[in-house]
Image: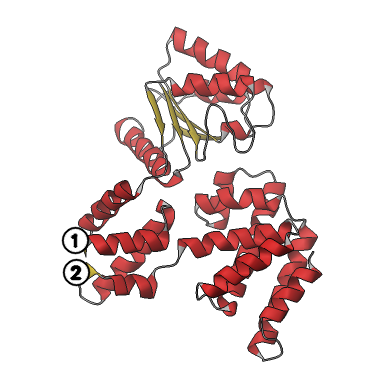
Amino acid sequence: MIIFLCGSDSYRSRQKLNALIEQFKKQRDPRGNNVVKIDGDKTSIDEINGKIASGSLLAEKRLLIVEELFSHREENIFKALLDYLQKLEKRGNENSLIFYEPKELESKKYGAKKLTAARKKLFDYLKTQKFSEQFNPLNNSQLSTWIKQYTDKKNIILAPTTVASLINTAGNDLWVLHNELDKLVNFTVGNKRLEITTDDIRQLASSGAAEENIFALTDALGNKNKALFFLLLENQLEAGVSLQQILALVSRQFKIILQVKEQVMAGQAQGQIASALKLHPFVVQKTVPQTRNFSLDYLKNILQNLTKLDYKIKTGQNDGLTGLTLLFAINS
């Protein structure tokens, strides 16, 4: 059996993947000895075939999970894997293979590039499988339903206007929404209440738009786009975000970029990076492209300058805005 899970909503696809793993363990393999994960961006046909063939005598079959195969740089593997899977299908396969792609992946596009012919053929083959499922971002109506289902399980009430306020604040990323709801539920229960209010959201929920702007700010800095950098900075200030908050968010993002870049250079896949750094997969997914804009020396230098600037602002030696202006000049 071949299962294909893909799409940019990595929260729901990861939930589905975890559920399939737990189901397999419950039905076939309580100890999980025959659940095998493979880094798709570095695998080979020999590895996949070897993992399938080396099943335990105590288990009827294996569950093989291949993550991020379409990030593989070797073009030959896509044609070879398609041939392998088709032959496996013809002779019958008692094992389960899950191909997991936690990103936007379409037949015509792969990131910013078009799929090559070999990649497209494999993608189309996987998409036609009976257990293929694509996880696209939820629209506002679907998000409202998802939030209600989540809070119903916690016996917490949210009025429709409160739900709308949460969506407007946190955006449609379910990783972010899940974190915000956990925070809001714990706050509400801790105060011996049953309903989350819009005031709670204003007080506790982070702005998804603000986080997006921080990604954009660091991108502008990396691309030496001075005009865009200061436009985004101005927008943040007009939205009521303080310079101290902006500095903290920018510092945090550059620390993440540095950590992720070191992991990428060590040959780690996105799933491994998320686990090693204890970051949500969506954060790693969005940060990996940013690492290409910066050298290690650049990142270490800018973090040092951000630390110095933070100290000067706190001690009254710099007004913040001037410091950020100079920061751009130093690092451009």
Give the numbered dot on residue 194. Answer: 2
Residue 92, how many percent across, how many down? 42, 11
Give the numbered dot on residue 325. Answer: none
Amino acid at the residue labelled 1: Asn
Pick the residue in front: 231 or 169.
231
**283 to the left or right of 301:** left
SS for tag 2?
Answer: loop
Quadrant where the image shows the C terminus = bottom right
- Tell me if residue 17 comes above or below residue 88 in the rendering: below
Residue 83, how many percent across, how many down? 57, 13
Q: Which residue is pictured at 56% across the width and 18% down the height?
A: 121
Q: Kindly report the distance in space between the C-alpha atoms of the residues bearing marks 1 and 2.
A: 7 Å
- Tell me if residue 11 comes above or below residue 158 in the rendering: above
Amino acid at the residue labelled 2: Leu
> Residue 2's quadrant in the figure?
top left
Residue that numbered label 1 is attached to:
155
